[in-house]
Image: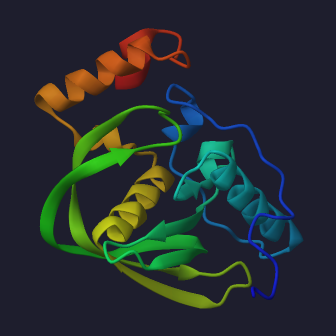
Amino acid sequence: MRHGVIPGSRGAVRPMRFLGDPGLRAPCAEVTAFDAELALLIEDMYATMYAARGVGLAANQIGVGLRVFVFDCPDDEDHRHLGHVVNPRLAAADGVSVRGPEGCLSLPGIEAGTPRYDRAVIEGVTMTGEPVRIEGTGFFARCLQHECDHLDGGLFLDRLSGLRRRRVLRAVRRAPWAPAGGAEAVES
């Protein structure tokens, strides 16, 4: 039996920002206030991530330009990793580069084989300011790198080239949530 509160159970689902929203392309600011407002943001982020059936969510995906992300992600051995990181820094990304399927809650329904390192280490703090170091391999490493990219204003499609990138951009133009301005909005 589980004891304690399920992350996100007290949070509110916030509207997701989609590709074309300028907040997704802007680097996020460092968190300086470790208060009840930050705790509420993290709860809302969990609730939003679960409602969207994701495995990770960065704050700018819900319109908050702060360096925070949450995750509930399995690794390749199907071990569950659940947590949050405030002011994360990608301390290491190494090992072999693996091209694997990757999608994004801000580009719903679109997926592409994206190269990522098989190991990642994130350093940051918790919502209370306690230092945290998270190491992931496989799919979890992919998730950690993906969320750090978001906080720097990046998206997985930035890591694509050639035919894969053209296919994603074509799918974006056809998506019901497609940004005004079509591919030009995506490429800027």
Query: Residue 9: image x %, image y %?
Result: 82, 64
Q: Is residue 173 above or below residue 160?
A: above
Q: Can the viewer see residue 188?
A: no
Which residue: 23% across, 52% down? 100
Q: Is residue 56 left or right of residue 5?
A: left
Which residue: 16% across, 34% down? 161
Q: Nearer the viewer, residue 172 or 91?
A: 172
Q: Quadrant of residue 158?
A: top left
Q: Can the viewer see residue 74?
A: yes
Q: Is residue 117 above or below residue 168?
A: below
Query: Residue 62: image x %, image y %?
Result: 67, 44
Q: Quadrant of residue 11?
A: bottom right
Q: Nearer the viewer, residue 38 or 174?
A: 174
Query: Residue 14: image x %, image y %?
Result: 76, 44
Please state, as top left, top right, bottom left or bottom right, where the C terminus lies in the image: top left
Q: Quadrant of residue 41?
A: bottom right
Q: Is residue 112 left or right of residue 122?
A: left
Q: Residue furthest top?
A: 181
Which residue: 53% across, 79% down? 124
Q: Is residue 181 above or below residue 74?
A: above
Query: Residue 50: image x %, image y %?
Result: 66, 54
